[in-house]
């Protein structure tokens, strides 16, 4: 771990430490909460709630807490070990300019980055509009009618496309999938991993030579190719379809402004990365991948899809369509395991489209293309051979035996190029490439009078795309891509949208299982420093020492926290951590010759991603029943172990369980599975209830994933980014994910992301959190998460009974409020309560997971007593409104609960004819008179929108009354 100089860091009297500010409850407030619960001290409460059996013996072994200023200094020192060069490596990652108005007012604006996934559409209209813009832009650029709201990265998006083709092409269900050899190597590596796990045949072939023999499920092409080559793919696409195969094209989104899009060439699916639309390189991620599909495939589309529906007044309104929470409902039959995606990055890319418009994007693409053309002519004249005459922005040079020398010479001139092999060099231009860069490359390549040659070439260069690939169709014709040009307009558009939404900058977001805690500004600050943000994922390792130090150190600290031997931060969401962890289990069994161990036990209460990930890892899901008290049904567990004794791969449990309770017998469950030869996967997404108190790696787990976007303060970004590190015991360390693109590593597991370090760009957030909190701060955070959850449970129990509790009636870090009885009596549903909370200015708790008819509340340690009381008061007031229904003052249908949320338009309407007053509608508690959030729309009709699916921007006239 990084040694930090020992300076006194703890607060002197009166001065608050970072941990003091991260944690909400303090002093008298803590006393009040403990009194409510009947405990004298916080430790008494914790010792009662957490089973002694799982408690860790020693405090966390972490460096002492450092102040915000010190940690920022430490980060500057680490960042200084990264060397920023002009990145012309390409291979799917290109320099770009994030317009400052977007950098500061989206990526660095808590109104955007602290929002949650828009499951509650009425408080998410702003980010839903931004994501709909993204979908519209992607759909237009790719020439396919339906695009989703982002995937995790290009390589995994191709993998998702391959699986989609395998699902959709039922007539070729057993046939092989063919990847063109001119795909990025990281893409091929990730798809290979999926094919191995699922056991389907994959062939890599040079499709420019025609299709291979045999039955084919689908083919994947890339445009431009890994070699930079741009070709008309119509013929091979038509041939594939003729043979009954489906077609995916991985396409460069910027290139599509100039070249014929995949949809027009006949492809079924287009995928790719939108990083180069204004999103920093971030050492490989997070970036939003995209996927668009032809008609007929929308119901198989993985990831989130924003659609247009109507609110209760008939106004167009946005919400997630079709697969909303689909893993939770379809589980092992889900189309994919993706839950958290890359919303914030998709929003950034969409705003880049809004800001530049189609003409601007085209001009940027043309500039990059012309620079590549000028460079091609300079280097061609100097005797260098080009591998392809037809390119967009990437030149591949054949330089027999000279690749190392030329790449080194370019580096000395400040520019990173791509070394493909000893004889081949790649150069990619982009939005930021200047004449000076071309001159520097020409000099590095020994061109005589480099400046003169570049000047002459730039004066003479013309667009050099073959006529059969030149795009003639229009794109981004919707007014939103034409009306925002001045910075004032841009600023106000961003503010207008974010004002429609509720994020953590306005209210607590008590979403159970999501851990919506503070995302501190000091944690966020460093991610946009160029020394972190402007590093290419495949930059040479001597330029990325700072990144490697930070990552190794974070992995070591996460090992220390979880009690595991090794951690990989490569998975870029919890779902991907699950997949990587289950693959490690699978590969371990295979290495031991236990190929028949393929059954994964999953409790009925598990998070939906668990079952979906198990299927992707090639495992067979067997469900274990939940007992009446919410724990694993031990008799059923025994029976399932017995029935699958020789085929048991392992069990996947969540701890504390998704019911928010510490099962006292978790060790016993682990022992039973181990005794039968199985491995234990502990879903660590609920680590906020464990850090400093118990270690999954010590109480029975062989592998866990963590969600850094929950416990470790990476903001949710409106539905991503995330990081889902996978942590393993010693015997599984060799099976941690390896490098997708050939980097040397001792980890031999399957790569699950496009780059070795996944969403590296946001890791400084978690690193800063751990560094500023230290062992004691982290442990106190956990204790306070227990305190706030138990306080809420205790105060609300008489209004809405708490469904599951553990020792002495205590919960862990969240509690499930059971509304079913109240619903049966009043007709008011948990959903009505969720919508009515909006009128009180709150984001609803988790609705209907893990139990239908309930709300799951997780206040986290970051909320203070006053905010928690405001929430409790709102819930009590809502309960009183339910009593009004019971008393016959209005029916459920007429009630302010069913008619919630109340938009300003509804409340001021001249024909108010409701059974309650306007005051009750808008200001049910007095505090709202000063600080009022009005939902911009009324209740949204979800089902209606699914019946009549619209997934791109509606015309402005649709909003006229
Ligand atoms: C959030 C969560 C996941 C999934 O994480 P993503 O990052 O959204 O993929 C898995 N398991 C549990 C228990 C969770 O709460």
Image (spheres, rainbow, N blue to C red):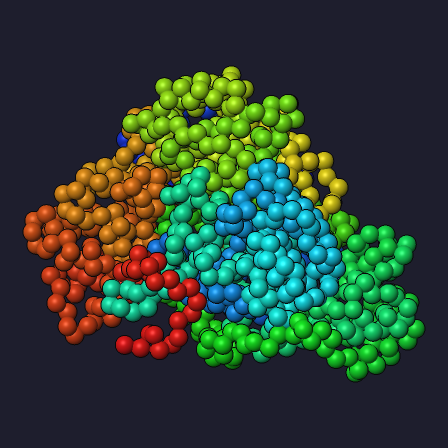
Quarter location, residue 196: top right
Q: Is residue 833 left or right of residue 585?
A: left
Residue 133 x, y percent position in the rendering = 47, 67
The reply to whether residue 768 is visible in this rendering is no
Residue 412 x, y percent position in the rendering = 84, 60
Quarter location, residue 44: top left
Residue 277 x, y percent position in the rendering = 59, 66
Q: Is residue 510 left or right of residue 696?
A: left
- Classify 617 as above or below 428: above
- Classify 578 as above or below 634: below
| Along the viewing direction, whichever of 913 and 132 lies nearer the viewer | 132
Quarter location, residue 816: top left
The reply to whether residue 826 is visible in this rendering is yes
Residue 854 x, y percent position in the rendering = 28, 42
- Residue in the image at 57% along x and 25% along y: 596
Looking at the rendered image, the quarter that the C terminus falls into is: bottom left
- Residue in the image at 67% along x and 73% along y: 468
| Along the viewing direction, whichever of 867 and 184 lies nearer the viewer | 184
- Classify 824 as above or below 249: above
């Amino acid at each position: 771990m990084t040694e930090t100089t020992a300076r006194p860091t703890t607060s002197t009297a009166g001065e608050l430490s970072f941990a003091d500010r991260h944690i909400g409850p303090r002093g008298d407030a803590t006393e009040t909460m403990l009194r409510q619960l009947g405990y004298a001290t916080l430790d008494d409460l914790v010792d009662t709630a957490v089973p002694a059996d799982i408690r860790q013996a020693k405090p966390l072994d972490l460096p002492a807490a450092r102040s915000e200023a010190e940690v920022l200094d430490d980060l500057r020192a680490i960042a200084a070990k990264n060397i920023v060069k002009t990145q012309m490596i390409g291979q799917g990652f290109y320099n770009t300019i994030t317009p400052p108005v977007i950098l500061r007012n989206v990526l660095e604006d808590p109104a955007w980055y602290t929002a949650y996934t828009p499951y509650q559409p009425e408080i998410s209209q702003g980010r839903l509009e931004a994501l709909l813009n993204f979908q519209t832009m992607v759909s237009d650029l790719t020439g396919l009618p339906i695009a989703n709201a982002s995937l995790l990265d290009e390589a995994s998006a191709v993998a998702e496309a391959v699986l989609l083709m395998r699902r959709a092409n039922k007539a070729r269900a057993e046939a092989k999938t063919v990847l063109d050899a001119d795909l990025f190597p990281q893409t091929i590596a990730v798809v290979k991993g999926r094919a191995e796990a699922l056991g389907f045949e994959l062939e890599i072939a040079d499709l420019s030579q025609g299709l291979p023999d045999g039955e084919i499920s689908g083919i994947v092409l890339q445009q431009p190719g890994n070699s930079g080559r741009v070709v008309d793919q119509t013929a091979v696409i038509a041939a594939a379809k003729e043979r009954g195969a489906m077609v995916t094209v991985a396409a460069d989104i910027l290139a599509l402004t100039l070249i014929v899009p995949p949809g027009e060439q006949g492809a079924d699916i287009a995928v790719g990365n939108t990083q180069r639309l204004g999103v920093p390189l971030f050492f490989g991620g997070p970036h939003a991948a995209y996927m668009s599909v032809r008609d007929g495939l929308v119901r198989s589309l993985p990831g989130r899809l924003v659609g247009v529906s109507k609110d209760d007044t008939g106004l167009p309104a946005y919400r997630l369509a079709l697969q909303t929470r689909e893993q939770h409902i379809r589980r092992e039959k889900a189309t994919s395991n993706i839950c958290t995606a890359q919303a914030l990055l998709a929003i950034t890319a969409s705003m880049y489209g809004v800001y530049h418009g189609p003409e601007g994007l085209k001009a940027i693409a043309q500039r990059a293309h012309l620079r590549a053309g000028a460079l091609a002519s300079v280097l061609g004249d100097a005797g260098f051979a080009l591998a392809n005459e037809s390119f967009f922005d990437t030149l591949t040079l054949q330089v027999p035996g000279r690749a190392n020398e030329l790449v080194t010479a370019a580096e000395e001139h400040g520019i990173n190029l791509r070394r493909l092999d000893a004889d081949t060099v790649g150069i990619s231009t982009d939005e930021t490439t200047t004449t000076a860069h071309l001159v520097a490359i020409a000099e590095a390549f020994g061109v005589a009078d480099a400046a003169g040659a570049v000047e002459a070439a730039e004066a003479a260069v013309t667009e050099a795309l073959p006529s059969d690939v030149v795009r003639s169709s229009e794109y981004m014709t919707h007014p939103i891509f034409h009306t925002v040009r001045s910075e004032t307009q841009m600023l106000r558009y961003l503010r207008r949208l974010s004002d429609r939404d509720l994020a953590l900058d306005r209210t607590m977001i008590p979403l159970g299982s999501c851990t919506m805690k503070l995302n501190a500004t000091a944690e966020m600050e460093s991610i946009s420093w160029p020394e972190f943000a402007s590093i290419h994922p495949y930059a040479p390792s001597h330029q990325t020492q700072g990144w490697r130090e930070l990552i190794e150190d974070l992995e070591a600290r996460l090992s220390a926290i979880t009690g595991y031997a090794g951690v990989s931060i490569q998975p870029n969401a919890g779902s991907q951590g699950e997949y990587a962890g289950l693959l490690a289990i699978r590969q371990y069994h295979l290495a031991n010759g236990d190929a028949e161990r393929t059954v994964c036990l999953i409790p009925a209460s598990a998070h939906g991603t668990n079952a979906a990930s198990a299927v992707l890892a090639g495992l067979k899901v067997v469900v274990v029943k939940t007992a009446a008290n919410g724990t694993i049904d031990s008799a059923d567990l025994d029976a399932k172990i017995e029935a699958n004794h020789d085929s048991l791969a392992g069990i996947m449990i969540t701890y504390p369980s998704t019911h928010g309770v510490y099962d006292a017998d978790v060790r016993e469950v682990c022992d039973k599975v181990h005794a039968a030869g199985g491995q234990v996967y502990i879903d660590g997404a609920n680590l906020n209830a464990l850090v400093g108190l118990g270690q999954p790696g010590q109480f029975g787990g062989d592998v866990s994933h963590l969600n850094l976007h929950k416990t470790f303060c990476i903001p949710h970004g409106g539905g991503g980014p995330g990081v889902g590190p996978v942590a393993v015991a010693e015997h599984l360390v060799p099976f941690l994910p390896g490098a997708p693109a050939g980097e040397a590593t001792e980890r031999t597991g399957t790569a699950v992301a496009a780059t070795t370090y996944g969403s590296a760009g946001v890791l400084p957030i978690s690193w800063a959190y751990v560094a500023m909190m230290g062992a004691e701060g982290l442990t106190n955070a956990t204790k306070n998460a227990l305190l706030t959850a138990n306080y809420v449970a205790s105060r609300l129990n008489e209004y809405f009974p708490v469904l599951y509790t553990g020792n002495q009636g205590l919960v862990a870090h969240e509690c499930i409020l059971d509304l079913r009885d109240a619903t049966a009596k009043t007709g008011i549903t948990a959903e009505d309560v969720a919508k009515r909370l909006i009128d009180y200015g709150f984001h609803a708790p988790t609705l209907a997971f893990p139990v239908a008819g309930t709300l799951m509340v997780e206040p986290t340690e970051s909320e203070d007593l006053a905010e928690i009381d405001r929430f409790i008061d709102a819930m009590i007031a809502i309960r009183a409104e339910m009593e009004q229904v019971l008393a016959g003052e209005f029916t459920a249908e007429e009630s302010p609960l069913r008619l919630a949320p109340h938009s300003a338009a509804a409340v001021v309407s001249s024909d108010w004819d409701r059974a309650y007053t306007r005051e009750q509608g808008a200001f049910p508690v007095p505090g709202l008179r000063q600080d009022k959030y009005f939902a911009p729309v009324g209740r949204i009709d979800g089902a209606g929108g699914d019946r009549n699916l619209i997934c791109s921007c509606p015309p402005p006239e649709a909003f006229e009354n």
